[in-house]
Image (cartoon, rainbow, N blue to C red):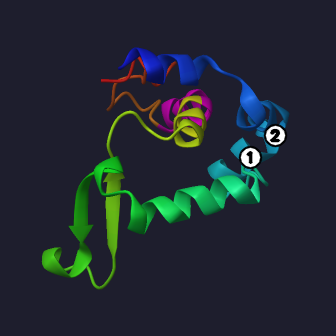
Amino acid sequence: MSASLAIRCAADGDVGTRLVAADWPRIEGELDARGWARIGELLERRDCDAIVDLYDNAGDRFRNRVVMARHGFGSGEYKYFAYPLPGVVAQLRCGLYPRLAAVADRWNEDGHRRALSKTHAGFS
């Protein structure tokens, strides 16, 4: 992990504050019951717009482009961000990972899989 990514992971920011304030008992309960949950508004409109604008206008911000039809998965495409990740994306990943890893560990208590790292930086 790059040093700049580690700094952004440690930064609280608006996203971090919203993640801490989220109703995690409800979210985890919904994940357990349905496999999905709504967290609420984590991003400002300007953050969403900036990420959307990257898709078509920032060729070097992405390391890979996958065209779904090429792999027999229907239509559409997606791209993988290159490092360093945009700040808000890094904050989301680092903030969500510990909570979601705990849920995944609970789901894997059957002993068939190893426990996940408590932080995203420790995941390999």
Question: Observer-nearest residue: 21 or 91?
Answer: 91
Please name the amino acid that badge 2 sits on.
Ala
- Residue under the image location 42 percent in, 32 percent down: 110
Under circle 2, the secondary element is: loop
**Looking at the figure, which quarter contains the C terminus?**
top left
For disc 1, the neighbor class at 10 Å (few under 14, some 14 to 19, many from 20) is some
* Residue matched to label 2: 22
**Quarter assignment of residue 51:** bottom right
Marks 2 and 1: in contact by CB < 8 Å? yes
- Tag 1 residue: 27
Residue 78 position in % (x across, y down): 34, 66
Tell me the quarter of the picture where residue 50 sits.
bottom right
Q: Residue at x 71, y 53 (%)?
A: 30
Left or right of 124: which side holds 41?
right
Q: Is residue 56 above or below residue 6?
A: below
Along the viewing direction, whichever of 17 and 54 lies nearer the viewer: 54
Picture coordinates of residue 58 (x, y %)?
38, 57
